Image (spheres, coloured by chain):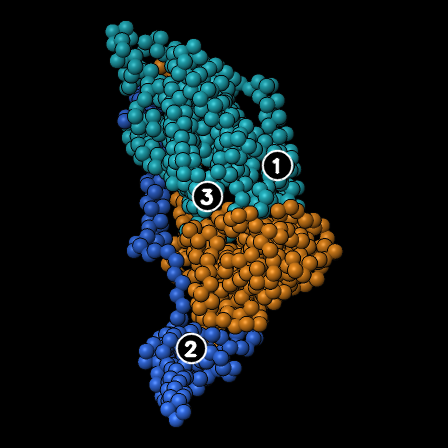
Chain colours: A blue, B orange, C cyan
Amino acid sequence: MKSMAKVLLLSVALGGAVLGLGRTADASHAKLKVVAPIELTAGDSAEVQAILRSADDGLPVAAAAVTFYMEASFGGIDGEVELGRAMTDENGAAILSYQPRSEGEHQIRVEYLTPGASEPEEATWSHSVAGATGQLYRSTAGVQIPGLNVWLLIALVSGVWAILLSVALRVIAIARAGTAAEAMASEAHRPTGAEAPAAASRSGSTAAR
Amino acid sequence: MPGTKNDKDMTKDSDYDQDLPPGRMQGPRKMGRRSVLRLLGLGVLGIAPLPILPSVLRASLGRGLVRSQGAAARAPNGRIRQWTMIIDLRHCDGCQSVGKPPQCTTACIEGHFAPEPMEWIEVFEGELPGGGTQFIPTPCQQCQNPPCVNVCPVGATFSTPEGTVLIDQDRCIGCRICMAACPYDRRFFNWGTPPVPPEARLADYSPEHQVPPKKGTVMKCDFCPDMVRDGTLPYCVQACPNRAIYYGDLEEDIATNGKDIVVASRFLAENQAYRLKQELGTKPRLYYIAGHGEAVGRDAFAKGRLPTEWPWTQRAKGARTWKR
Amino acid sequence: MEEVGTWRERLEQAALAPITKTSPMYYLWVAFLLAVIGWGVYAYSRQFQDGLIVTGMRDRISWGLYITTFVFFIGISHAGTLISAILRVSQARWRTPITRMAEFITAVALVCGALFVIIDLGRPDRVLNVVIYGRWQSPIVWDVLAITTYLTASIAYLFLPMIPDLALFRDRLAGRVSTWRTRLYDLLSVRWQGTSAQRRSMAAAITTAMILIIPIAVSVHTVVSWIFAMTLREPWNSTIFGAFFVAGAIFSGIATLIVVMAILRKVYHLEEYITEKHFVYLGYLLAAFTLIMIYGNISEYLTTGYKMAGDTEFHFRQLFLGQFAGFYWFYFVGGLVVPGLLILLPWTRNIWGVVLAALLVSAAMWVERYFIVVAGFRVPLMSYEPSTYAPTWVELSVMAAGFALFALLITLFAKVFPIIAVWEVAEDVESAEMSSSAGRLAPEPAGGGSP
């Protein structure tokens, strides 16, 4: 009977120890800690580390899902946005790649919900974000090819109109040549008679090509 | 005989000023004709460069082509907003559950006095593989490579710094090449006097608030720039009973449907958001999350929605509506 | 010698006859055309007042008869370029009697075409915005640049070879016509005396213009096609549009020239100068272009149809089997195959056959523009029922007025200006005579006449 009691006690103790160990692995009381830079600039990416450790023995809790939230306000609505979620690795660290977009004082709330627990574990991390120098979001469309711009079109159209101009000038040259011919003919006309005009003017006769 | 004919051919006697001394080449009348000819030639040359002159001037003066409108909408931090809209089709059932015509369309029509039959946001019923349908509210896609802006001959439609596309109805010449170019059927023409209620005519027109519409010009959804600049959500976003439409800013990477706020990039990525006719390269600012209203209890095979209505009974004098 | 002289006289008489003699038929014809134009102006006034709602165009099919007719007119404006410029460059002698008509068709067609764009605008009162605020990235602005350049070049190219003939008119018609006409001929003949200096200037100018006008003409119809091809609509989103439209333009230009030529030849008794040979040669060109057009059609429809991507299936159904089947097959069979056969088969290769082929081609090319525009618009872009387009009386009236204006301008031209290039025909005949029978006829020296 004494030996039976000893065995029972031992098994209970062992069982308790096993259960105790198991419980620390599940970390029903876990502590969250956030490690991240405190001052950021909008547009720069930063890593936010949420480290989950068991409350009892401080061992890291692995493979736990951690969610990151932030307060935000837009379009007259205030609320909380989910920034992302991550799983803790063997060191108990869950890493979120975070890119702040609006400046000012912000707070990121990290949440871990222990399975079976009703209240989530939380940690907050305040940081201040400085303004970005320029626009962060770039929407580009199209391809820039150097030289392919309005000047090319203008050059082309101007070139054609310049040639047309030269044609117009030819017409003026014709008129001028005509005036000269008429003048010569008027001088020749009176003294000499029919030959010179006949020679000079054959309207519609062969044009040199 | 050729010779004698040519005698008459060449000149008329009246051409000669008989009293001129031999050295003088021409009489005063001939001088007059010559300068007329010169003037004509020069006149033609003067008119010749007209077609290209404005472009030359503008290019050389470095003047922008965008018609000025209100100041760009900025976030409190000063950066310019980059508007976007995300429509969660899992929550859109064509307002079947509320038993009314699509409320987004109704609110837009009422808010803008959109003339009948224009539906700037139009709820199309698209077919799904397998036979069901999905409702797709389709406002202007606000493309980043907008075919309409590219082809407009006078720059009446233009892209804003916020990434949206607006129309200046005071410059539009009504050529409708933009309507030919838009691949989403999102531009509407005022074929006649626009049928709007008389109170619409009291408003001041601006490209950001297209009231009253003008005959012979084009209009479309504008993402309500005058409202969102002040932080008020567009009519369609506010009116959706299922809160399916999110309006957001890609610069601040945030969006809201009037109740929930999300990080826009995350919302898009996690829900495999897509854009309409993406292969065309128009790069719309409007994203869709696939669905058929299942989140609000719609069965994919429950087809049909109520037709859109234009609520005013009075119309402007002389105006009549037309079919699309 | 005397034969040549008589022949020459007959030629000049033929050129002068339209000016000096006017039949009552002429007045009737002009009155009819003016009536049609007047009715069209009334129709347009209704459109100007009420807006484009009086047409059949709506949001889904937002271009119709007006743009169809615009493209059609710009297309036939290539008549002049082909005949005058290309044939002149290749020194085809037979072109000489018809160059003038071809060049004039070009100028008139461009004016009528440009008119239709303005008629189609929703706000024609703001048409100057294109000049003031024009964006060089817009196909419409390219259009404006190209058409104004082409119009200027065509007018120059019409005017230059006409100078010697205008001088002929100036000399022969002095005192026989009204004062304004005398002044006009005086002014426009720019003191042409036929001196060698003038001939050199004119030759240089014509050479420049004829070489320049060919690329201009090609660019014009290419940019007109790009109004469609720069959009993303399925039936228009094709790289072939530029080349196809230019080929179609030259094609319809030849057809229009044949028709106008036949009419003017009949009315003004030019049978001696415009012979069956001219019709047959133009007919050969027409037949060559039917083959090019058939090739273009096969290229376009086989490559898209093989793949059936996107909305191709819808478009093919509406074009080949559905709503537009009548239009398409009339165009293909009646406008391409039948005219080709009419010309290639020896039994129909005569004036009547060629003119019939040209009439079919003209009608078919208008129809082709129609289904390119309307069927192109009809393909639904989103999930909605396809609409229909039916032109209203306003559009039909204005279109009729446009064609009447075209006819009227040609009629008036024939009454004011020489419709035959007298000096070119004479030069052609003379050099032909000189080369063919040097013994029979003493060549007429350029210098002076022997009594």
Q: Position of residue A197 (x, y in %)?
A: 33, 22
Residue A52 in the figure: left or right of residue B210: left
Kind of residue at disc 1? Ala
| Foreground pick, C434 / C8 | C434
- Check residue A66 in the rendering and tell me which mark sits there, or answer none: 2
Kind of residue at disc 3? Gly
Number of marks drawn: 3
Quadrant where the N terminus of chain C sits is top left
Residue on which the image places disc 3? C310
Determine the image quadrant of residue B250: bottom left
Determine the image quadrant of residue C27: top right
Q: CA distance from mark 1 to mark 3?
A: 26 Å
**Which one is in front in this view, the residue at disc 1 or the one at disc 3?**
3
SS at mark 3 in the image: loop
Q: Is residue C66 above or below residue C284?
A: below
Q: Position of residue B143 (x, y in %)?
A: 46, 57
Kind of residue at disc 2? Val
SS at mark 1 in the image: loop
Q: Is residue C416 above or below residue B25?
A: above
Badge 3 crowding class, 10 Å Cα cut-off, few under 14, some 14 to 19, many 20 or more, is few
Residue drawn at x 40%, y 77% as measured from the top left: A64
Q: Which chain is disc 2 placed on?
A: A
Q: Position of residue C110 (x, y in %)?
A: 47, 36
Residue on which the image places disc 1? C390
